Image (tube, grey):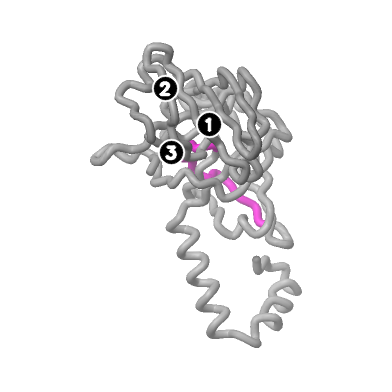
Amino acid sequence: MFTGIVQGVAAVDALTDRSGLRTLRMAFPSEFLQGVEIGASIALDGVCLTVTRFDVAASSAEFDVMQQTLNLTTLGGLRVGSRVNAERAAREGAEVGGHVLSGHVDFCAQVAQVRQPENNRVLRFAVPAPWMRYVFAKGYIAVNGASLTVAEAGHEEGGSGWFEVWLIPETLRMTTFGDKREGDAVHIEIERATQVMVDTVRRALDERLGPLMPVLQDLARERGLNWN
């Protein structure tokens, strides 16, 4: 379990590719690995990975990433020097400053727009269908492992859409969001309570309304309402 509070930025120190497997050696900030053990969980850009080897003195650790994870995330595109957000697994009794995360990425979104008002940085992300149904203004969402609040959200025809987050200087200092440019891909983990609520309501409506659903959907579209 993770809290979505990024504890530092790690950089790729070395890559080793084998059939169906990539080993990442990551360089972490000083003291980040204090107390770490083989088998410990660390989230890199929101992806929960297992420590397979480490050197506390050198502040480095290695992780094996299987092919499925490489296919579903941006970890396959990392190069030596690439920077990622890092968080150690939460300890029992630790303060949850963000929200509870599993470290399992749901999908990748794309940076659609970057704005820089004074003392802030605003990122807009394009979200593919059907994931936009779980994104709401003022709700929680995890972007590259960071727990963020959705400032604005827009739902579009077909189930896609966008959302924006506002980032203060401290968040930019502790994460890689200051590096992000339009077109970059990021990992998204939906807030689970929201997903359960939305799926439960949709399932109940499907069961109760049944054959009436297509008619109601057509009516909603005629009135300019989004039913995705």
Residue 153 is covered by the magenta coloring: yes
Q: Secondary structure at mark 3?
A: loop
- Residue 108, picture quadrant: top right
| Amino acid, disc 1 | Leu
Residue drawn at (49%, 37%) of the image = 145
Disc 1 vs disc 2: Cβ atoms closer than 8 Å? no
Residue 182 in sight in this render: yes
Looking at the image, is 20 positioned above or below residue 197? above
Would residue 80 be found to the left or right of residue 191 on screen?
right
Earlier sequence position, callout 2 versus callout 3: 3
**Farthest residue toward the right?**
222
Three-letter amino acid code of the residue under disc 2: Phe
Question: Image height check: is 21 above or below 55?
Answer: below
Q: From mark 2 to mark 3, how far is it between C-alphas?
A: 23 Å
Question: Which residue range is magenta in the image?
Answer: 144-155
* Secondary element at tag 1: strand
* Residue named by callout 1: 167
Can you give x and y, in whole percent of width and height, for residue 201 in the image?
50, 72
Residue that numbered label 3 is attached to: 4
